[in-house]
Amino acid sequence: MPGSAVSSPRDRRPVFLDLSRIALPVGALASIAHRVAGVLLAIGIPVGVYALDLSLRGPQGFARVAAALEGPPSRAAVVVMAWALAHHLFAGVRHLLMDLDVGSRLPAARRSAWMANAGGLAVALLAAVATW
Amino acid sequence: MVRRGPSGWLAWIVQRASAVYMLAFLVAGLAWFMADPPGTYPAWRARMAGAGTGIATAAFFAALLAHAWVGLRDVVLDYVRPRSLCAPVLVGLGLGLAAVAAWVLRILVTVRA
């Protein structure tokens, strides 16, 4: 690769990426899930805008969007997006509270990370039950 | 003290402020949706054509796209390698988000026409 002919110490750092042996602390799990959820939500933006556009074009478009939400694939997508939104929101509120110095000490941070992870899954479960 | 490049405080503020607005919008919107579901096309259209809803929704999408920009920019800078690819990817991302902004604006303007 041009531009990096001089290898810096950064380039020679050891890389350990054996995911089966990396035991993530609960806070790290909340953090990486926050990022994954954010990317999922971003991918959902054009889909959501398309649905909004179609639903406002006329009664036919509205009916098409309503019907599209009925099928099993879109129900699965709704459950995944419900998880993504809920987890991103809970983990995000956790960050906002930490900005205000609420719960930034380790025991409280671990507790709230656990709550964000569980809360996201609970909402996904609710969405699965609601769309069944 | 040597400072190189932007400090990132603007991105930090934008990310937090947009998050707080979106949280309020989603909670209020969901409560309204559940209390009075717009189950038919005329009801849905009438709701989205309201001036208050239009402004609040436009502000929501502005917040959403700004928030997505800050978050996706972080993701791109963290994972896209070689680093020389970051700039073109970010340009594409910015154009994509701008296109979505124009699309949303058109939807919200047409619904009131």
Image (spheres, grey):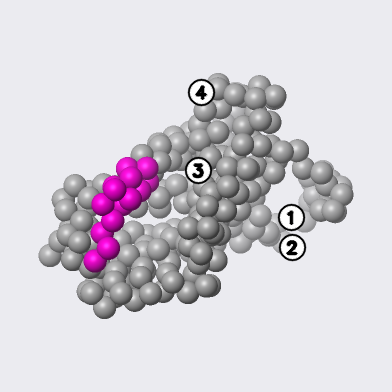
Q: Position of residue A68 (x, y in %)?
A: 41, 74
SS for callout 1: loop
User: Where is mark 3, residue-wise?
Assistant: A89
Q: Is B33 contained in the magenta span?
A: yes
Relative side of A34 to B24, left or right: right
Q: Position of residue B23 (x, y in %)?
A: 40, 41
Alpha-carbon distance for marks 4 and 1? 40 Å
Q: Earlier in the sequence, mark 2 or mark 4?
A: 2
**Amino acid, disc 4:** Leu
Q: Is B64 contained in the magenta span?
A: no
User: Where is mark 1, residue-wise?
Assistant: A4
**Viewer-proximal residue, B39 or A38?**
B39
**Amino acid, disc 1:** Ser
Alpha-carbon distance for marks 2 and 4? 43 Å
Do the numbered discs 1 and 2 sit on residues whose CB atoms are within 8 Å? yes
Q: Does residue B51 appear in this view?
A: yes
SS for callout 3: helix
Alpha-carbon distance for marks 1 and 2? 6 Å
Q: Earlier in the sequence, mark 1 or mark 3?
A: 1
Alpha-carbon distance for marks 3 and 4? 17 Å
User: Where is mark 4, residue-wise?
Assistant: A100
Please identify the quadrant where the C terminus of chain B is shown.
bottom left
The residue stretch that appears in magenta: B26-40
Relative side of B65 to B88, left or right: left
Relative side of B110 to A87, left or right: left
Say which mark, if any, is on residue A1: 2
